[in-house]
Image: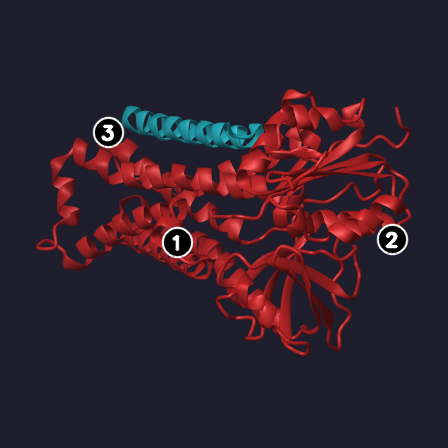
Chain colours: A red, B cyan
């Protein structure tokens, strides 16, 4: 056992604490409604239907916490898990919001009049809108590609729908009154939702505005095999940013930082390197334009973010499984090892389709001679005479390269979804402690 | 097969959802009893 043994980065206690906070925050609107003076109770079903509505509002509001990009919470879970939680809790919130009118209408048919434009036109329109909007929000997120929504438009639509749903919820609560009858309750109700909504405004407007003052300039545009473009940017008149290997930044290129096209990219450069590098494979609308970028073009970075990082004082080896362009954070991790003259062992399993399309292949070969690094290329369509690993990643393959004492290593997984699923499940089956397995999915939606 | 942590996140979310439904029912029940 090493003397400097540290607690794993992912801890059940941290998860319980933060989930407890989220749970409590989701119950704030209900608590507010119940504070005296509370109106006389009606039937059990009506009271339950109303409670579902309050909780639904709370659940919708806490979703904004996830767009706030909290640097404090993410490292104890990893961006990937936080996004998954947002997704799952968002669905739970959706169910609550829809159950609210359903239960009320089932309890008392009269409630259907809330949707009747002849009774109250604006109210009927607003409630019909929320029902459609929240359904649209979920559907466009789960099946973004089927709707041919680009990431930029999805992100805009997602934010606007979310804001408008919560706003309508606030107005609805105030208009119904009942549990929110004294004015102070209405003020607190609106204040709670406004705080949540501000988080979106903060991350989409205030942060980019601050980033505007910290401009970067593209100093090199290079290409790598596999249609990959590597950008180097340098700070213009400021100190740049401090980042760890494996983290990422939101990048805006050429236009202002308010532009729709803000995308998350992993750093490729070694930790804290002033010459900040990013790499992208020409896959989508945004990344296809990278090869046309010119030296001198402007860039804005917002970050660093993400918890795909090593222990700050690493005492462990690194076992990295990446596929395709998922190699970028691995390059940063390995370059940082070299910069720190690290002697810890590292294993890199790197999956690609073609031998000729392997980004950073030459540099990785060089790093293999400079570090205690074992590189394993997995090629799904290998060239003639290939003697290395071929086909898709399998559990047997992972087992072959797993160190004899697997829990003395930290695990990093980044790449396409199916590869990550295989890697994560294999590591778990092979007895690797889940608290040291870090995943970063580059496809958020 | 989905990764373990994703399954856990899903289970935890479902558990939170169930707990919240329980809270809603309990609150409603207490209110009608009061």
Chain letter belonging to callout 2: A
Q: Nearer the viewer, mark 1 or mark 3?
A: 1
* Visible residue check, residue A181: no
Residue at the spot of label 3: A45
Chain letter belonging to callout 3: A
Above or below, A440 against A117 in this view is above
Discs 1, 2: same chain: yes
Report the front residue among A122 and A141.
A141
Chain letter belonging to callout 1: A
Residue A389: image tag = none
Q: CA distance from mark 1 to mark 3?
A: 28 Å
Q: CA distance from mark 1 to mark 2?
A: 44 Å
Residue A339: image tag = 2
Residue at 48% over, 27% down:
B11
Residue at the spot of label 1: A162
Is A340 displayed left or right of A129 in the figure?
A: right
The 10 Å Cα crowd at callout 3, few under 14, some 14 to 19, many 20 or more, is some
Please state the horizontal and vertical placement of residue A212, each as a whole percent of the image: 61, 74
């Amino acid at each position: 056992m090493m003397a400097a043994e540290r607690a794993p980065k992912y801890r059940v206690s941290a998860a319980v604490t933060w989930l407890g906070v989220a749970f409590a925050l989701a119950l704030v609107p209900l608590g507010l409604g119940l504070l005296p003076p509370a109106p006389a109770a009606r039937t059990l079903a009506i009271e339950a239907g109303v409670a579902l509505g309050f909780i639904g509002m709370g659940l919708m509001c806490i979703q904004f916490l996830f767009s706030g990009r909290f640097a404090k919470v993410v490292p104890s879970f990893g961006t990937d898990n936080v996004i998954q939680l947002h997704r799952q809790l968002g669905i739970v919130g959706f169910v609550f919001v829809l159950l609210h009118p359903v239960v009320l209408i089932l309890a008392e048919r009269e409630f259907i009049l809330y949707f009747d434009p002849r009774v109250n036109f604006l109210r009927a329109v607003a409630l019909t809108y929320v029902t459609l909007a929240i359904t649209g929000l979920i559907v466009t997120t789960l099946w973004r590609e089927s709707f041919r929504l680009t990431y930029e438009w999805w992100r805009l639509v997602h934010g606007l729908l979310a804001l408008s749903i919560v706003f309508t919820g606030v107005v609805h609560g105030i208009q119904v009154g009942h549990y929110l009858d004294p004015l102070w309750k209405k003020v607190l109700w609106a204040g709670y939702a406004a705080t949540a909504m501000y988080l979106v405004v903060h991350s989409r407007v205030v942060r980019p505005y601050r980033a505007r003052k910290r401009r970067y300039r593209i100093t090199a545009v290079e290409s790598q095999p596999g249609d990959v473009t590597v950008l180097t940017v340098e700070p213009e008149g400021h100190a740049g940013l401090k980042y760890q290997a494996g983290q990422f930044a939101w990048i805006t290129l050429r236009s202002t930082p308010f532009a729709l096209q803000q995308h998350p990219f992993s750093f490729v450069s070694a930790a804290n390197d002033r010459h900040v590098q990013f790499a992208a494979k020409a896959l989508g609308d945004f990344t296809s334009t990278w090869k046309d970028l010119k030296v001198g073009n402007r860039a804005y970075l917002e970050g660093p973010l993400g918890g795909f990082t090593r222990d700050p004082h690493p005492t462990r080896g690194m076992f990295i499984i990446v596929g395709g362009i998922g190699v970028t954070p691995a390059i940063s991790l390995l370059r940082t090892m070299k910069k720190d003259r690290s002697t810890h062992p590292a294993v890199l399993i790197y999956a690609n389709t073609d031998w000729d399309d392997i980004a950073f292949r030459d540099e990785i070969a060089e790093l293999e001679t400079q570090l205690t690094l074992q590189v394993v290329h997995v090629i799904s369509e290998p060239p003639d005479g290939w003697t290395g690993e071929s086909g898709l990643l399998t559990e047997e393959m992972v087992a072959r390269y797993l160190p004899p004492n697997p829990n003395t290593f930290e695990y990093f997984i980044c790449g396409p979804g199916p590869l990550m699923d295989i890697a994560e499940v294999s590591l778990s089956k092979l007895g690797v402690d889940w608290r040291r397995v870090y995943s970063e999915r580059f496809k958020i939606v | 097969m989905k990764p373990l942590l994703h399954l856990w996140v899903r289970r935890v979310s479902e558990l939170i959802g169930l707990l919240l439904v329980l809270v809603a029912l309990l609150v409603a029940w207490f209110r009608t009893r009061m």
